[in-house]
Amino acid sequence: MRSFCWSFVVLLLAFRFPFVHAQVKTDAQLDELAGPVKSVSSSTVQAADVKWQQPEGPTMVRPIWCHDCEYDPDGNKTKSGEMMERKFYGERIRLVGDDAGKVTDRYFYDVSTGELRRHDLVGPYGKTEQNVYTAGQLRYRTTYAYDQYGNMTEMRSFDAAAESQGYTLTAFTQDGTFLKGSTYTKDNNVSYEQTYDPETEIEHFTNYDELGKVNLSWTVAKGKMISFWETGDSSPHNSGEHFTEPDGAGNVDDYACHSDLHCDLSHVRYEYLDGDKHTPLSAEWRDAEGNLKSAAYFEYEVDVYHNWTTRKVWLWNPDLGLRTLSETDARVITYWK
């Protein structure tokens, strides 16, 4: 099952189809931190002006997910942002729980103004509703629904007047394998539809225009492209033209398809420091013939919980010719005792 960039931003930027039974992670774990983390403070201590650009597709250099954050003993985030010129920019998070100590509400306040930015209602599998505010006024609201196994099955977006802005529906098997996903506009017209048959491992994707006409369609069987079709008048960056297929051990095959029905295939291969697939040692992007096109390499110092405290990032492409040090990052991590 692949992933690609959807253009229905409000609904789908934060949504990716899961493939197995859903697991609820703490905020600290989502930030790729292990152990009872209390706080993390990150900084780039050395940076170079390197002429290297992340290719469109899978990420080769993971960002620092949270520069300056704090967490409660259960791994819930209570502060999020970044220190810049000795001033903190970000938000404080007030948590409200039930009698059993489970978080039911999260209130996000701008540190500079004290204004409420966001209010999340939280259920057993994640947020069930999110309200976003600007200058104290509701801007939009999004609701979420899950199946009994914790897989997200519905996401709906509304404006400040409670008018629908579109929605996404998904279906899964009992073990959490994705079967179908559809995205609709605010007028209830389908924009995208994707299906997967776990028995045949055949997957279809279709992209529609505002009149319901097919813009683009492709079929992949067992991770390999078997058909691709696109209208001649499709936009230069039609959603669905660029997608990835998993290739085991965290590696991916990348497809960049064109209006002439030709797809460029490339491969991204990762090596990791540990078994969690969170700390890459290298990421290499090669074309279909195996020629290296772009690469990133990493060196770390880690603490007792295997969280890195120092990271060096080395980059390579044909223009650079040699591995070049791009940045050195440092993190100070404290833990709950």
Image: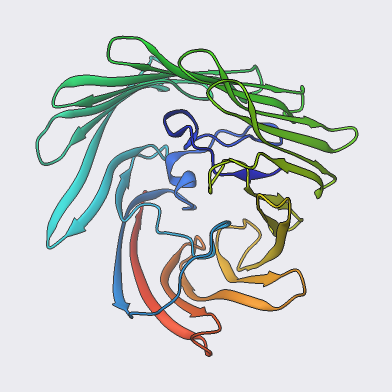
Horizontally, is 86 left or right of 166 in the view? Answer: left
Q: Is residue 95 above or below residue 186?
A: below
Q: Which quadrant would the N terminus be assigned to in this image? A: top right
Residue 252 x/y as whole percent: 69, 57
The residue nearer to you, when weighing 59 against 20, is 59
Horizontally, is 239 left or right of 20 in the view? Answer: left
Number of marks in the rendered image: 0
For image coordinates 49% across by 37% down, the residue present is 7
The residue nearer to you, when weighing 53 against 81, is 53
Does the rendering let one see residue 337?
Answer: no
For image coordinates 53% across by 34% down, the residue present is 15
Q: Is residue 320 above or below residue 225?
A: below
For image coordinates 85% across by 45% down, the residue present is 222
Looking at the image, which residue sits at the far front? 232
Which of the 4 image quarters holds residue 111? top left
For image coordinates 47% across by 19% down, the residue present is 166
Residue 85 x/y as whole percent: 12, 63
Does the rendering let one see residue 25?
Answer: yes
Looking at the image, which residue sits at the far top? 162
Q: Is residue 303 above or below residue 13?
A: below
The residue nearer to you, when weighing 256 against 224, is 256
Residue 165 x/y as whole percent: 41, 18
Which of the 4 image quarters holds residue 199? top right
Looking at the image, which residue sits at the far bottom? 322
